[in-house]
Amino acid sequence: MSKLNSLAISDNGFIFKPSTGESFTTNEIGLMIINLLKEGKSADEIISVITEEFDIDAISAGRDLYEYLDFLKREKMLD
Amino acid sequence: MEQKKLTIGVTGLNNIDSPGPGVSVIRGIKESEIDARIIGLAYENLEPGIYMPGLVDKTYLIPFPSTGSEAFLERLEYIHSKEKLDIIIPNFDSELYLFIKFSDKLLEMGIHTFLPTMEQFEERHKDNLPEYAKKYGIKVPESRPIVNSKELSNLPKPLSYPYFIKGKFYEAFKVVNNNQGIYYFNKLSAKWGLPVVVQQAINGTEVNVIALGDGEGNTVSAVAMRKQYITDKGKAWGGITLNDERLLEITHHIIKETKWRGAMELEMIKTDEGEYYLIEINPRIPAWVFLAVGAGQNIPEMVCRLATGEKVEPITTYKYGKMFIRYSWDLIGDIADFEKIVIFGEL
């Protein structure tokens, strides 16, 4: 199972990592990014969905996405 | 078929800020299908478990193990003559030696226990951990038993600050300089005796496993947990069950190699690099056992069944993300109950 799929994520943005017992909270965009990653979407596809759903341009969406990916990797939640 | 009612003696009723496991053990038994009469065995007359409503059916004071084995056995014989104990679950490190030493004698009397062998108990002592690790292929931090505070100023490499200085049975303090080391050495040796153990501090997260071995190398139960809130005494005030496969693998390995008999708690440090260092093996049920019960593995029940010779099938699953949060609660007692314990040693 991938690291992302082993996480327990609620619709409220509460993330539980069963391997370490740590928990995190995330906002609406973070939750959307995680769900799209789990569906196997590429970075470009995720940026496109973010710009459609939220009132931000592609550059800002890209910055948010890569910052969030860094966070997920740093916390060992992403392979 | 109607199940026989079991009379079970349990120690460790000191549900205080550094709690004994007795109250949680009893809660586990009461949640099981075992029909039990619970006999509390207390060392002090203000152990909260004595007075908690609905917990014990009767409590007897017993002498501290340091009083000597004769007085200890005499008291158990007296209690057994009154109560016809089927099982005793001892829950303190400091009393285990006597219970293991006299387990055959207790069995002759009709009292069952399910404890490690004397060899298993002795070889996992903190002061023997490096040899233990070598024998069973486990990673442990550098450590050294010391019997004199002068040794602290000349610790062999690679031991360096910060390190933990640990009492023979309980307590550990982080040390960053020699004066601190001497202070804690004196404190720990006065309280728990010698040797005192110096153990290199390892950066990482402490993770724990409660486990039960059947004495033939099989792990009957194992639940992993991380402390979420730690008191100033280093005790867990909150914890959560984990899905940590490597940690459980190590547990199974230790139980298989040592043919561990009875309950145990493994205390380990997981480093950021994902390495696991064993820092301690407690040869008994830990105070947080009720979390394991809540997660689906009733270890006190399994201990009772193994003690009476039942075959117990291993449980390999439990719920992850189950939490415990301890709390304190003021019981209102009556001086008449206190009087009975003080004057007659039973309630």
Image (cartoon, rainbow, N blue to C red):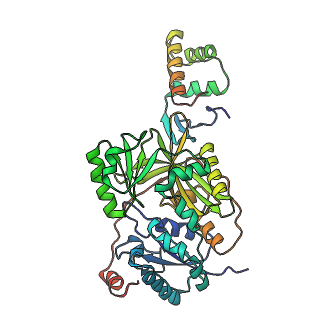
Q: Residue furthest bottom?
A: B81
Quarter in which the N terminus of chain B is drawn: bottom right
Residue at the far right in the pictured view: B1
The residue lying at 29 percent from left, 58 percent from top is B187
Q: Nearer the viewer, residue B8 or A52?
A: B8
Is B135 on the left-hand or right-hand side of B328?
A: right
Vertical order, B85 against B292 (above or below): below
Relative to residue B147, is residue B76 depicted above or below?
below
* Image location (x, y in percent) of residue A48: 60, 14
**Residue at point 72% right, 69% down?**
B311
Coordinates of residue B32 in the picture (x, y in percent): 61, 68
In the drawing, does residue B163 fall left or right of residue B300? left
Q: Is residue B280 visible?
A: no
As rendered, which of B178 and A63 lies closer to the eye?
A: B178
Please indicate whether residue B240 sits to the left or right of residue B229 in the image: right
* Residue B114 percent coordinates (x, y): 60, 70
The residue under the point 51% across, 50% down is B130
Q: Quadrant of the C terminus of chain B?
A: bottom left
Seen in the image, is B266 located left or right of residue B232? right
Using the rendered image of the protein, determine whether residue A73 is visible from the camera's viewpoint: yes
Q: Examine the rendered structure and indicate whether residue A28 appears above or below residue B57.
A: above
How many marks overall? 0
At horizontal 43% and vertical 70% (from top left) the residue drawn is: B13
Name the one closer to the observer, B190 or A75: B190
Q: Position of residue B235 (x, y in %)?
A: 41, 54
Above or below — where is A28 with respect to B171? above
